[in-house]
Image: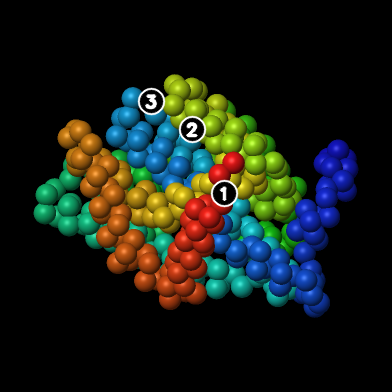
Amino acid sequence: MSKIGGWLRNLPQPARARLAVSSYARPDPEARDRLDTARAYRADLDGLRAVAVGLVILTHARWPWVNNGGDAGVTAFFVLSGYLITNLLLAQLESRGRVDIIGFYRRRVIRLAPALLGLLAFTLMLGVIVGLTTDWRLGLLSCLVYVSNWVQVAGFNIDPLGHTWSLAIEEQFYLVWPALIVLLRGRILYVALAGIIGGTLIRFIATGPLEYFSTITRADAILVGCLLALTAIRLPRWTGAVALAALIGVAAINADHDLTIGIAMIATAIVIVARIEVLGFLAPLGRRAYSLYLWNWPMTLLFGTMGPLAPLVTVAAAEVSYRLLEAPVMHRGGQPVANATRSTWSLLRWSRARPSA
């Protein structure tokens, strides 16, 4: 513990500023700038989302060179989510001296619920009209309250909603994390470090559905992202390129499950802090990653034996979901879609105007 304390004392000033959050009575006068920075749109992170969901889709399609894409892609999603959410929570605490926890949960529901309810409606029609032999009714209920991962730990098959386990883990984590940030404040970094170590060790020991679906054994990936936000580390861009190659590479080989997750956590973390701007070209696809993920597994179950049909139908269903269910909600909540589009267009214009080497 003393070594960790020494490491904290040697952190660069920007990193330490993230930990020494301002008091409730007198918010940091420079915190507004940090809040704007935390809210600033990064097209490269949406590009990373595109890579992650692409690995998942190719694995479900049984692409011959993507053996562990599901493990790598979902782990990347977890790390990204921890990083982005923690950044926003800390910036809000520094700017206002408090965290609007109720507002935080309200925004999460408004952002995630429409697309998920669309998938649940589809599953209901499929179950009633076509008939399903799985515990899909239990799946509907468990998805509504975000416990579908624990239902699968208990041994129930809730397909075509089995893939919602990762969504459930994230929401369960965020029932606890905002409160911990408020209550523990400067000590939250120790909690993140302990959670990463503990979660990894438990995953190595656990087996079966508990190891794969439980919140305990998957929280380490989310906490790695949280740790990045707490420390504000920056790395050279070349390290991000190497890490991105490692993330894709570990998905392509038939590596051990735990090894894949470990490499994916580290690789994703490096890609985030190294800021690979060229990934911004994949941002339009990354902004659709949530809908792509929601619809890929059901389409794989329905059309997975018909060549490339499942990925094609996934893209079509995700586009409908994005335009009708996701984009209207995001427009209403501050128009991040429009901001994202402008940022991507600016990046495209910059790349075209940049003289070749």
* Residue 330 position (above or below residue 214): below
Q: Count neighbours of disc 2 (C-alpha within 10 A) and say few if under 14, some if 14 to 19, many if 20 or more.
A: many
Q: Identify the residue under disc 3.
A: 65
Mark 2 and mark 3: Cα distance apart in space? 10 Å
Q: Identify the residue under disc 2.
A: 248
Looking at the image, which is closer to me, 234 or 156?
A: 234
Looking at the image, which is closer to me, 97 or 246?
A: 246
Q: Position of residue 326 (x, y in %)?
A: 37, 64
In the rendered image, is residue 167 in sight? no
Q: Do callouts 2 and 3 mark residues in contact (Cβ within 8 Å)?
A: no
Residue at x 53% of width, y 46% of height = 278
Mark 1 and mark 3: Cα distance apart in space? 36 Å
Mark 1 and mark 2: Cα distance apart in space? 30 Å
Q: Quadrant of the C terminus?
A: top right
Which mark is drawn over residue 71?
none
Q: Amino acid at mark 1?
A: Pro
Q: Position of residue 12 (x, y in %)?
A: 83, 50
Of the two numbered discs 1 and 3 on the same chain, state the one appearing first in sequence: 3
Q: Count neighbours of disc 1 (C-alpha within 10 A) and say few if under 14, some if 14 to 19, many if 20 or more.
A: few
Front disc: 1 or 2: 1
User: What element does badge 2 sit on?
Assistant: helix
Of the two numbered discs 2 and 3 on the same chain, state the one appearing first in sequence: 3
* Residue 153 position (above or below residue 43): above
Of the two numbered discs 1 and 2 on the same chain, state the one appearing first in sequence: 2
Q: Identify the residue under disc 1.
A: 355
Q: Is residue 316 left or right of residue 36?
A: left
User: What element does badge 1 sit on?
Assistant: loop
Find the residue positioned furthest to the left: 129
Q: Amino acid at mark 3?
A: Trp
Residue at x 50% of width, y 58% of height = 349
Residue at x 41% of width, y 37% of height = 55
